[in-house]
Amino acid sequence: MRIGELARCAGVTIKAVRYYESLGLVTPRRLANGYRDYDEDDVRLVREIRALGNLGISAERTRPFLECLAAGHQHADDCPASLAGYRDAIGELTERIEALTARRATLMQHLRQAAHRNGSRIPSPDDEGHTMSDLSQLPADLPVPEDDGGADHLPGLAAPHLHLRSTTGETVAVDALGAGRTVIYLYPLTGRPDVDLPDGWESIPGARGCTTEACDFRDHHQELLAAGAQGVFGLSSQDTPYQSEVVERLGLPFAMLSDPQLSLAAALGLPTFDVDGLTLFKRLTLVVREAVIEHVFYPIFPPNVHAQQVLAWLRDTPAD
């Protein structure tokens, strides 16, 4: 067969066949007229070279496999030299993976350092204008959430028997918080400087502002305790390592509770919303006293002064 037919049968280009010939991997017969003549054995060799190439073994390093076939073996990797070729390729690939992993870790470290130093979110290539979005500031045109009645049923309900993991490493029982008032503010998702927020986040009423809300509770934490709160918790569906980074970066004096299964929402019928394949808590705050929900703040706006709203309620509503 001619070189074009060989290329079609083996699934490669004519240029590739000629390259294999230059390496001495394929040796066609010469006809009386000088044309190259290939047979089915050549097709098998070229297919083997292509298959090994798909595994990351270059054509130059396929010779042991082809020699195994030429020796009459059914498979190109039936020979010890072929197995050695696999091992060499695996070793080189392992070195490349380790080098790339180390490079990725270094890049991530630089990204986090730069992002945290600037206190901003890293823009993605899809962001129009590639502008930085400062998580500590709220946009002027932030949409206001409406009261959909999703929390009307909560006051007076017993706190459910749930144990949630805390960023302190402890497990907190929601129905065993103590006799005093405990403030639990539920939020959708706190942004991180090195992680993009879900698409359309700022257009969802009540979504944007978790960082500013956390900072407001941080800045008024001691006043909340002085006004009668025995404790403050933030709560979201993010996992504990994610929350721990936020606690450390923002210097929060209180712990976050992780509820990745939204168990509290299921137990109390809390309002949630979906975005980018995630189901998240809608922003609301519970005041729990003696294992009963005494008061609920919902909807919450603006989030950057919500701790002050809670503080005003505590001062205006002394515990009996």
Image: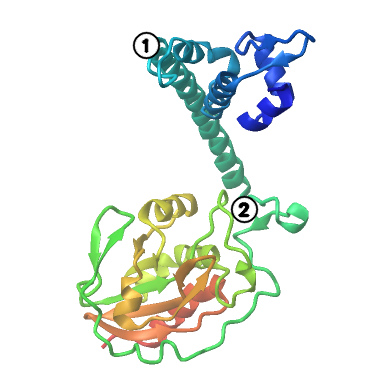
Q: Residues within 10 Å of mark 2 (few under 14, many from 20)?
A: many
- In terms of image quadrants, where is residue 310? bottom left
Gap between marks 2 and 1 measured at Cα: 54 Å
Where does the image place residue 42, in percent across and percent down from the top left?
59, 19
Q: Which mark is residue 267?
A: none
Vertical order, 61 against 1 (above or below): above
What residue type is disc 1 on? Pro
Q: In this view, does 71 lie to the left or right of 180?
A: right
Residue 228 visible here = no
What residue type is disc 2 on? Arg
Residue 302 visible here = yes
Please tell me which residue is depicted at 31% across the width and 72% down the height of the picture.
263
Question: In what quadrant of the picture does the C terminus appear?
Answer: bottom left
Question: In what quadrant of the picture does the N terminus appear?
Answer: top right
Q: Residue 80 carries which label?
A: 1
Vertical order, 233 against 149 (above or below): above
Please tell me which residue is depicted at 36% across the width and 86% down the height of the picture.
295
Where does the image place residue 174, in percent across and percent down from the top left?
25, 72
**Mark 2 secondary-structure assignment:** strand
Q: How crowded is mark 1: few (under 14 residues within 10 Å), some or many (20 or more)?
A: few
Where does the image place residue 172, in percent across and percent down from the top left?
24, 64
Choose between 213 and 299: the one closer to the eye.
299
Which residue lies under the disc numbered 2? 121
Choose between 166 and 79: the one closer to the eye.
79
Where does the image place residue 250, in percent across and percent down from the top left?
49, 54
Q: Is residue 279 left or right of residue 104?
A: left
Which one is earlier in the sequence, the residue at label 2 or at label 1? Answer: 1
**Mark 1 secondary-structure assignment:** helix
Please tell me which residue is depicted at 46% across the width and 91% down the height of the picture.
149
